[in-house]
Amino acid sequence: MAAWWRGVRAIVFSPDYGPFIVIPVAWAIAWFLQIRAPALEFQPSIYLVFLPAGVRTVAVFVYGIRGALIAAGSGLITTTYVIDLHGGAMPPALTTAMYAVFPALFSWVTMVAVCRWAKIPKSLSGLTLNHIAAIVLTQGLVVVTVKQGIFHEVDLAGLYGGVSLPEALTRWGAMFLGDVLGSLVGIMGLMAGYAIISAIRLTRR
């Protein structure tokens, strides 16, 4: 049993294979919890706390561009499922891919831009709470604007047709709030997990 667990742990924490296991599993768990919390859905596909955003943010923080690409692939799968869940007609494949993939890629681009502006090294050493807040808020601003822009231009799955400007701004604000809170949940989960692992390692010494 111990040998089996060590093998699993080695694969999960492997820089080569770990992201391909950790990110899709975490993404699936986040959506599982999201769908079972209907009170958080402000409008179809707009959540006041968007848990997958936390997975996306942590994936970018920990794995960089590779994490963004894996999160994008995971998002492509769940986007088609969520559209079907709401009974919407599937939009063109390119539009679906844009909506699913762009958030993860823009999250990575935003993080890189903020890190360069704040002169944070690639190792993210010296990262402060102010840096994390700047990255999360900027990511939310960029990602939500891109997603709402796609909604406005294409009317994804027929869910957003004929929306007035005040209503569109309200939905933008709700989605922004959901992405930011979801990202904070993900980061706090990452920090808690790191603290637990560090404590376990200290007790074994």
Image: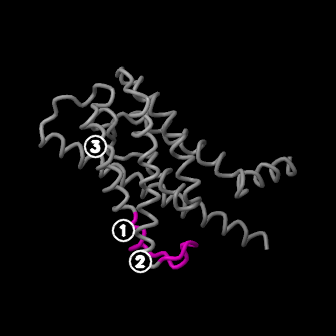
The image position of residue 80, as x and y in percent, is: 45, 29
The label nearer to you, 1 versus 3, is 3
Q: CA distance from mark 1 to mark 2?
A: 10 Å
Question: Which numbered disc flags the more N-terminal residue, 1 or 2?
Answer: 2
CB under 8 Å between discs 2 and 3: no
Residue drawn at (16%, 29%), measured in percent from left and top?
A: 162
Q: Magenta segment, which residues?
A: 120-135
The image position of residue 38, as x and y in percent, is: 36, 33
The residue to which callout 1 is attached is 134
Rendering colour mode: one colour
Q: CA distance from mark 1 to mark 3?
A: 21 Å
Q: Is residue 143 above or below residue 120?
A: above
Question: Which numbered disc flags the more N-terminal residue, 2 or 3?
Answer: 2
- Amino acid carrying mark 3 in the image: Gln
Question: Which numbered disc flags the more N-terminal residue, 1 or 3?
Answer: 1
The image position of residue 46, as x and y in percent, is: 32, 39
CB under 8 Å between discs 1 and 2: yes
The residue to which callout 2 is attached is 118
Q: Residues within 10 Å of mark 3 (few under 14, many from 20)?
A: many
Q: Is residue 38 magenta?
A: no
SS class, disc 2: loop
* Left or right of residue 44: residue 170: left
Residue drawn at (18%, 41%), measured in percent from left and top?
A: 168
